[in-house]
């Protein structure tokens, strides 16, 4: 039984990735993609990898009824249209920041005034590694932020297994690619300005800190740099645990946490060229790669976590959560394992 | 019924891509990958995208019997081991240049002395768009050169439909990525030397000219430039037909030739940013994208053809041919359509 | 005696490069840079390499009197303001396409209606290798197009020394970087869309053909591809001379033409990694690098010519011409030789 | 009066950069460049930007007497040949790690057994911002490590002006380009493996920590990532001072420290696209760019420091120190201010 799926905001980067995943999914069929700017144009007009797809963008006003609706709108839009979205579909997966935080308090701390704060507690955070049990049957799901996702995947075993308590001050240095800023052209995203950079674009106060604190109880000092890649987010986390830990302790925590997770892969010191997690290793896939190293000089744990921000960091995570919500095979449509060699990709 | 498959030369770029395709293929199971340098190491040690794969490289001397054997060895190696390869498998697909040319005359013109010239006529050229009818049941198949493949895909309709006769002098300007030179590090392939380049690396006398002449009857003036991408080959072909042609003539020829081809996609003037074939649009996929433009000032036809050299230009083409040889679904294991946005990838 | 210099359009890429050259020039002092969007902002606000410069953008309406005025405005603007520009300075060097072509006939063939056609014959083409004798004392100078400059530098010796007669049909395949499209952000110039590309952006009808025909008498079939670099234009020219030529003939022609030229450098087959002209080798410098190869199979000459489009292709050429116009040392302020290793740069 | 200069190890990246600087220097003349692999080849054969230079590599055994000798040899070589070097020149500037640390204790902690430990105290650390007063007349100078240089430039004002005391635990996350690993090709430096990466290559225990501790008294937790650029090192430093500081305190410390420094430039929050220090902004120049931000949530200071590792991080710093040692104009030969736009470069 095929489920129908719609994508609101189908001409953006995330919308295109959703359409690609839905097109290749054994259970979902993409029947609608909306775009104000490209109404009536074919999807392949914007996303050249989907030239074979027989689908045209439709006006966002004309929403069809579908089994599952993915909304990839700018922050602040979904909260105003959420009733309309939920009328159109039994299951809504929102990929904006609108429903990611668990309460109005958190939201107000980091954003400006929520229009529908009562829904914050109702929405389920999409990250299955953190929240699998609540996703089955969920009808309102909020995909996490990509940088938060990378960080949470890296840190989760340390909090779950008591290596960190929440009192430690963590430094998180994240490197991101140019797809993270969305598809709209600007001076800062111009190839001549954006190539070859190491650009501090959110030195302090990045909003993804909020999710990490809300869901892990971690206190993070977060800094994001834009580097020269397209897809990919890499989080390097520096933690100083209260008590010395061994590599064995860490391996134990990570293995116990992730051995059965279909989309988390360890990379920690082995390998030839690729010894630690790298965005390249997971590019195009829904994997998070995590690894760590111990600094014997100062008792520091350095954790590395790499994802494809378009996949595990947004569209892939959303489809993963939708699979769980609808009771499908968890990995359906997400089996792609990545390339080698590969660019950004 | 799963077919067993082996890869000789599994630690190189092409070998890794074959293993990825075989791993994701519904009918093939990769049971052996040989590598002299990495014997007993896991495949994931070299190819980080295959970290999940439970397979170790084995010594090339210990060849197992398989249904199909893919040989990704340096040029000149296969011809010396071909009997051994054919003993190990009913179907051998060779990805080197050893069996690509149709006769000893052609071979001697471009290479040095073939050890088994009698097999040149026996081997089938793998490109299905050119040679589909002879691939069913073939037991020795030779994958084409990547630059030749891109050029042939661009030109085929013009020769098949009489737009070009073979008397014209064609200029072919090809741009290639860094995966084309193989995985071995060198000064020329060093990132600091290879990034941001437009480097004429085969100004004249490129051996892929031979295939184009042999299979199309075309006389080509070929020049290859290395540019800053990893995967991808893009051929721009400048032709001056004896008689003026219209865009309608060209559309007719290309559509008739390619409308039913599962792995050729037209891109010719439409689209938003992506108006013509580009390696990015097909990166990771088995598609060739072809398109053209007419220059009214001088009657020139400009043809563009873009492929992923690791896919349509080698490993994908090889699996495509193997599917046909073994009577499987032609597109099996090759359905991936590419990404947007994407790097090289 | 320092000469004062002004730049109209100082916040664009070409304007910034002019300001950098003028700042480092022993004889010129940049006293004004206009910018409508950045009026009153410091020059370093836009061009981070000029943070040390004590100069603010001024309103384009308030033009100061200077010795030499460089106008880096969009095409079509200079022709309307040229009287104002010439009132402000004894010497005007225009970097747009407005005064590049020698006559109204040429202009009308490629552009739409010139407002001041009588000035086309008066303006001097800035390329010293072609027009040095007329630049001394010139008061209206038009910098050439970057792609035309690369092509002309490559072809000039062949026409001057009778290797080509003008009857041959030349194919010119040009690769350009992302600075060529200017500083304004757009969807096509977005890093995620523009990285790793081989994109045919002017398959036919590129306007720089006009200059090449006008000044060399050559008939060129021109195709331009955007590739992944920032600065740089590389022209590969395929010519089939009426009579066979030898490498000795070619070396003779190029040496005679260029041995005394301070900004043309031969690169033809020698060298370690860098055997032919490449944009990387000249990045940041005012050099054109030229080289060639002969194809014995078909009598083809392949000529390679590489420049930094921001230097030899625009700002550097303009300063070079201004040096000659004002009777200064020809190479003043342009001695920088480039880097190794280097990115695009 | 021109000073003669020699470069030992002239075919490497650092050696080439030294030759470029010496060639353009008003007071130095490069009279010798040694290279075992390229003996008798022209310098331009390896460094295409120096094709105009009339100089051939000579055998390292045949050292000429010069005024100043720059030694760009692999770590561990200089200490064994230092007497020979000092016999050949009154002033030796070593660019390896051999003489960077102040004492044998430091050295043994991070490296293996020094052959000439008594020279460690004699050698002067080349960084003028830290050690200008001791460089005049120095006859043995040791250029600092590039990552250490970036970090020290960022931190120096905080230690000099009491914002940090040395008791704080600092996290330093450094991003470096591919020139840092030297010119020798390898699998890890292959363009296909090295492009588009965020690769943790020294998660812990990086030897440049030693210099930072030795010269600043800082306790640093250092992690280095390789990213997709060629030149450039960017250090992001996270510090938690014992007492809250204001932006005014920080501006005061940085201005007082650096206002008169010719090669340190502040970039802290202003600007259009380039708001903080970036390797692109200083590429090709001898500038260090430094800036900072305060995180009000947790009292964190985030310091950014960017250099061109080939310039301020090695060859430029060495020439700067040589200028001071020989009593020349401090900025001689180092005035280049960088490009915009620019790649890595």
Image (cartoon, coloured by chain):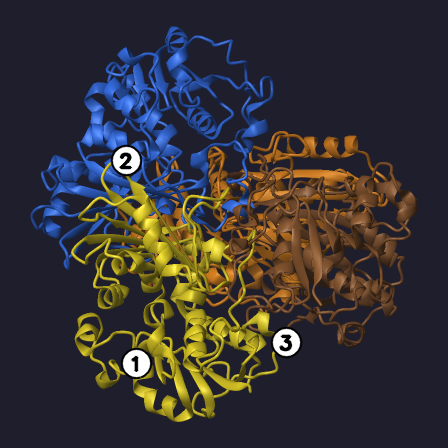
Chain colours: A yellow, B brown, C orange, D blue
Taking the spot 51% from the left edge, 10% from the top edge, the residue there is D61
- Count all numbered tags in the image, as a single digit: 3
Please provide percent x and percent y for residue C290.
64, 39
Please provide percent x and percent y for residue A43.
55, 78
Horizontal side of D77 relative to A335 (left or right) equals left
Vertical comparison of A49 with C181: above or below: below
Chain letter for the residue marked with disc 2 in the picture: D
Of residue C98 and residue C46, the one placed in the foreground of this image is: C46
In terms of sequence position, does the residue under pointer 1 or pointer 3 come before the other?
3
- Select label 3 or label 2 by which is in front: 3
Horizontal side of B249 relative to C286 (left or right) equals right
Of residue B259 and residue D204, the one placed in the foreground of this image is: D204
Do pointers 1 and 3 mark residues of a single chain? yes
Do pointers 2 and 1 mark residues of a single chain? no
Of residue B107 and residue A133, the one placed in the foreground of this image is: A133
State the mark number for residue D263. Answer: 2
| Residue on which disc 1 sits | A123
Taking the spot 13% from the left edge, 35% from the top edge, the residue there is D160
Query: Is residue D128 in sight in this rendering?
Result: yes
Within 10 Å of disc 1 (Cα), the crowding (few <14, some 14-19, many 20+) is: many
- Select label 1 or label 3 by which is in front: 1
- Where disc 3 sits, the SS reads loop
Chain letter for the residue marked with disc 3 in the picture: A
Circle 1/circle 3 CB separation < 8 Å = no
Vertical comparison of B165 with D313: above or below: below
| Residue on which disc 3 sits | A52
Chain letter for the residue marked with disc 1 in the picture: A
């Amino acid at each position: 039984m095929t489920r129908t799926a719609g994508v609101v905001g189908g001409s953006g980067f995330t919308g295109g990735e959703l359409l690609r995943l839905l097109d290749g999914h054994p259970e979902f069929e993409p029947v609608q993609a909306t775009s104000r700017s490209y109404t009536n144009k074919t999807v392949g007009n914007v996303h050249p990898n989907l030239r074979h797809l027989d689908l045209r963008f439709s006006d966002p006003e004309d929403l069809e009824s579908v089994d599952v609706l993915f909304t990839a709108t700018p922050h602040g839009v979904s909260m105003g249209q959420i009733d309309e979205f939920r009328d159109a579909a039994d299951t809504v997966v929102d990929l904006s920041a609108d429903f990611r935080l668990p309460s109005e308090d958190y939201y107000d701390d980091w954003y400006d005034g929520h229009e529908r704060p009562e829904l914050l507690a109702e929405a389920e955070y999409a990250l299955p590694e953190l929240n699998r049990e609540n996703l089955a049957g969920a009808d309102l799901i909020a995909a996490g932020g990509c940088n938060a996702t990378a960080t949470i995947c890296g840190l989760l075993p340390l909090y779950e297994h008591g290596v960190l308590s929440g009192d430690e001050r963590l430094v998180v240095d994240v490197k991101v690619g140019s797809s993270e800023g969305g598809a709209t052209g600007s001076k800062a995203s111009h190839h001549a300005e954006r190539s070859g950079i190491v650009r501090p674009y959110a030195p302090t106060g990045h909003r993804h800190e909020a999710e990490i604190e809300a869901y892990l109880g971690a206190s993070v000092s977060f800094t994001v740099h834009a580097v020269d890649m397209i897809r990919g987010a890499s989080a390097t986390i520096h933690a100083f645990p209260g008590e010395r830990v061994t590599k064995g302790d860490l391996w134990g925590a990570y293995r116990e946490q992730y051995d059965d997770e279909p989309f988390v892969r360890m990379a920690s010191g082995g390998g030839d060229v690729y010894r630690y997690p790298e965005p390249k290793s997971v590019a195009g896939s829904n994997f998070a790669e995590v690894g760590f190293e111990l600094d014997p000089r100062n008792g520091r744990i350095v954790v590395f976590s790499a994802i494809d921000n378009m996949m595990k960091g947004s569209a892939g995570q959303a489809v993963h959560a939708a699979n769980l919500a609808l009771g499908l095979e968890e990995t359906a449509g997400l089996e792609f394992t990545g390339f080698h060699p590969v660019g950004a990709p």
